[in-house]
Image: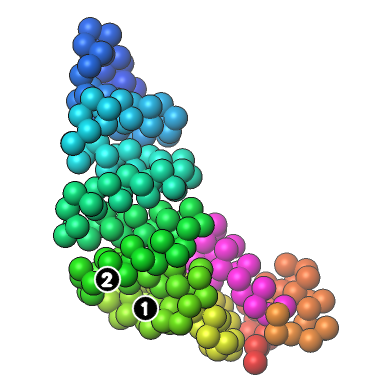
Amino acid sequence: MDDVAEQREIVRRNDAMLAERPGDDAAHEARARAHLALGHLEEAEADAMDAVRLDPEEVRYRELLAEIQSRRGEHADAAAEYAHLARRDPRQVAWTVGEAAERIEAADAEKGVDAARRAVRLDPRSFDAQLALARGLIRTGEAGALAAATRALDLRPGDAAAREATADALWLADRHAAAFDALHGLAAELSDPDRARVLAKARSLYRERAGWLGRRLASVRALFEFALGHGWLRVR
């Protein structure tokens, strides 16, 4: 039985169980995880919410609900779930980091920075906490973004997310040449959609710093990428 067929069988079995025992929170959890594996995010969220309703104190259900809400782009709701978990046990760095990351994605960067700082205080050597702090400070345009991004990169050298955050922080600090070189180098190692996102940043930075001829070149994506790939472009 392949994985898709196995997940469908889990859904089928738990459909039958819930028809007999509608209040079975474990069956809702199992069906939610199967729906999540199948990419049925709306159904997965409904089951996870039922599991939480039936047993609000079960950590596993709230973690699952937060994961599904994040996948659905419901970042404010996911942040609220992680915040609830973090209040129950502030020592669990992962939940505070989750709250920070989701608040930043929900365009609530200031609260995301607050949560990330709490996570860093709990564990200064947490890569995820330092990365969340760097991303939040980049979003809010605050000093300290480069230091946090550098700490994250020190903790996990070569990590693509930390390298991208470092490039963003260099740009924020007006170190344009270093930021452009960092984006260029990173884009060469990535595949889409990450490569497209990083190239778009490099193109925006180049347009920002280039003269009229450079802006004309950057207006044509294919031409910009061709020139970049041959090492013909520089930023001052």
Task: Please state the extent of the stretch shown in magenta in the rendering.
Answer: 185-207
Residue 25, placed above or below residue 157: above
Three-letter code, disc 1: Ala
Does residue 146 belong to the magenta stretch? no
The residue labelled by disc 2 is 120
- Residue 78 versus residue 27 in the image, above or below: below
Rendering coords of residue 80 (x, y %): 36, 47
For the point 20% across and 68% down, the residue is 122
Q: Which mark is residue 3?
A: none
Residue 161 visible at all:
no
How packed is label 2: few (under 14 Cα within 10 Å), some, or many (20 or more)? many
Q: Pick whichever, 209 or 58, lies toward us.
A: 58
Q: Residue 155's spot in the image, x, y percent?
A: 27, 76
Q: Say which residue appears at 49% left-offset and 66% top-offset.
A: 190
Sequence-earlier tag: 1 or 2: 2
Q: Position of residue 117 (x, y in %)?
A: 32, 70
* Residues tagged 1 and 2 counted as in contact (Cβ below 8 A): yes
Q: Quadrant of the N terminus?
A: top left
Indicate the amino acid at tag 2. Val
Image side of residue 179 versus residue 56, left or right: right
